[in-house]
Image (cartoon, rainbow, N blue to C red):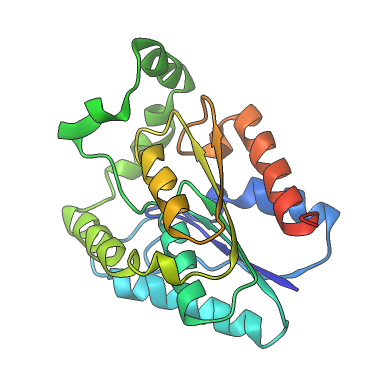
Amino acid sequence: MGVLFLHGYTGGRHELDPLFVYLKSRYDFEYEFPVYPGHGTVLDLKKVTGNEWYAEAMDAYTELRKRVDKIYIIGFSMGGVFAAHIAQQAEVERLFLIAPAFDYTKITKIGELGLTPTHFSEHMKLNMYGKIKNRVKDIPFRAFQEFKNIIKLKREGLENVTADTLIVHGTLDLLVPYKSSVETAGKIQGAELELLEGAPHLFAYTEESQLELNILAERFLFKHN
């Protein structure tokens, strides 16, 4: 059995490393953990395309398939969209989708998230912007256009996914509205949905949310039956 880990837009392995370390310390499995072109510790997104990002994910699936007979995919944010699309093109046993970016929050529609002043206060306490501001300056507008284009191309056909699916989303996600995961769960036959109260988009930056995520992944992927 093998696990394919797919990180998000402008991210890297650090987004899923806590979950990877937790699972690898408890279970023996083959894995692939690609980093998309231009992503990782240092961003260089000026020339790369969304198609190249997806191709990297698909190539990793192909490499893992050579070594195992069953594949589980853990996809975060944009990686969740890639995971669901791969599951339509190739054989995948289980999908664990973390805040999959089938939609994204537009500034003009932030009021539709249904967040209260308390929600915003709690989000500010997490200091999310302070943790990512050094990376934001390295994201050209062209890269955001590539993100929008590749999401539009790969988010269709969810009704064709046959893999066992669990979607996990935080209710304090300001980047990807959790309601999009509610809609996604309704499109994938038999999909389960777990909404984590107070969890932000970046689970890895909050200890409690990360612990909940670890346990959900373990139960679904390794103790499902």
At which x and y percent is residue 111?
23, 25
Q: Residue at x 49, y 66 (%)?
A: 83
Residue 86 in sight here: yes
Taking depth in this image into account, of 162 and 46 the one nearest to the observer is 162
Q: Quadrant of residue 94?
A: bottom right
Residues 21 and 211: in front is 211
- The residue closer to the viewer here, 191 or 49, is 191
Left or right, 14 with reference to 216? left
x then y, percent, for residue 183: 39, 48
Identify the image quadrant of residue 136.
Answer: top left
**Residue 19 shown left or right of residue 76 in the figure:** right
When the figure is inspected, residue 171 is found, relative to residue 80, above or below; the finding is above
Give the percent coordinates (x, y) of residue 35: 49, 65
Q: Position of residue 141 (x, y in %)?
A: 17, 53
Q: Vertical placement of 167 versus 31: above or below?
A: above
Q: Residue at x 23, y 54 (%)?
A: 144
Q: Would you say residue 57 is visible in this rendering? A: no
Residue at horizontal 43 percent and vertical 46 percent from the top: 181
Residue at the extreme bottom: 66
State left or right for residue 31 relative to residue 96.
Answer: right
At 72% from the left edge and 58% from the top edge, which residue is drawn?
A: 221
> In the depicted view, which residue is nearer to us: 16 or 71?
71
Q: Is residue 184 left or right of residue 217?
A: left
| Quadrant of the drawing holding the N terminus | bottom right
- Which quadrant would the C terminus be assigned to in this image? bottom right
Count of picture labels: 0
